[in-house]
Image (cartoon, rainbow, N blue to C red):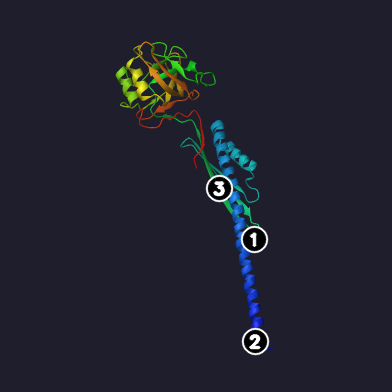
Amino acid sequence: MSLVGRRREGQEGQLLVIFALSLTALLGFAGLAVDAGSTFAQQRAQQTASDLAALAAANDYLINGSSTTATDRARAVATANGYTHGSNGTAVAVAITTTNGIEVHVSVSAPHRNAMAGVLGMPTWQVATEGTALAGFPDTVHGAAPFIFSADAFQSDGTPNYQTPTDFGETNGDVPTSSLDFAWTNYGTGNVDSSGVSDIIRGATVIDKQTEFGEYIGQANTGNHNTLYSDTDTYLSGRDMPVAVVDSSGNFAGWATFHVISATGGSSKHVRGYFLSSFESSSMRISGCAANACPRYLGSYVLKLVD
């Protein structure tokens, strides 16, 4: 064989080696692309499992007050969604803290079984997801309305009797005398005079106190304060307001959320609105926030993802 022939065969051999190496690399890249897409799908499914497990555990702890049962609940939900703790390299870790409500953090780690990346020596890689849920009963209200409603406005399970536009305000008593009555209040911070309550409505006075069960928060001067209706109509109409609920003696019993539609003074004194939430028999703190200066909320129950 001539020198030229041997050189041509050598070149062809080199091309075969280069082709083989290139093909291996192309297969590897293709494998990585396929497995990356599959990993993304697993991550999405795994994230759902983490979130649902966190929500279930937070709700369980709120009901039972047990870290053990809450952890078991989280892992049961993860299993129901395809990720069993301690099985096939899967780990479901649960962390519970109660410094800010009931906060449950669930992390799920599970191997992804690679279809093609194994050619490059990577038969699996770990996929990690995390979910955090918060549950509880908020203990602070912002800008509470300066009027109180009767516990008779609610059913025994806390469901409001009035969830459509309704007129409240039949009498001039110090406390609500019926389910359709209301009374003015400054939450026990002094005499309930028109000027002081008007300042609360307009945000000029900020109430900052802890209201306790059984605390009297009604009036002490038997009046319906005609001037306050125009203030309420001007400043509170269209707003969702945390409102106190009292027993027949005017003693604090809990909270609800009330939507103010309008207010009318004169010969027909009433506030028109309806309840947005159930009555919650829970102690609440009124924060130092002016009535119109910050968001209002009153959560009868909180269960949400926070991360």
- What secondary structure is marked by label 1? helix
The residue located at (35%, 23%) in the rendering is 234
Residue under label 1, please give it. 118
Q: CA–CA distance between discs 2 and 3?
A: 62 Å
The residue located at (60%, 62%) in the rendering is 29
Residue under label 2, please give it. 4
Q: Earlier in the sequence, mark 2 or mark 3?
A: 2
Q: Quadrant of the N terminus?
A: bottom right
Amino acid type of the residue that numbered disc 2 sits on in the rendered structure: Val
Q: Earlier in the sequence, mark 2 or mark 1?
A: 2
- What secondary structure is marked by label 2? helix
Task: Residue 141: name its quadrant.
Answer: top left
Instruction: Please state if 78 lies on the left or on the right of 191 as rendered.
Output: right
Amino acid type of the residue that numbered disc 3 sits on in the rendered structure: Thr
User: Disc 1, disc 3: CB below 8 Å?
Assistant: no
Q: Nearer the viewer, residue 109 or 112?
A: 112
Residue under label 3, please give it. 129
Q: CA–CA distance between discs 2 and 1?
A: 42 Å
In the rendered image, is residue 120 in sight?
no
Task: Residue 267: name its quadrant.
Answer: top left
The residue located at (64%, 84%) in the rendering is 7
Q: Is residue 227 above or below residue 26?
A: above
Instruction: Please state if 27 lies on the left or on the right of 190 as rendered.
Output: right
Q: Which mark is residue 235?
A: none
Instruction: Please state if 238 lies on the left or on the right of 128 as rendered.
Output: left
- What secondary structure is marked by label 3? strand
User: Disc 2, disc 1: CB below 8 Å?
Assistant: no
Q: Is residue 289 above or below residue 170?
A: below
Q: Residues within 10 Å of mark 1 (few under 14, many from 20)?
A: some
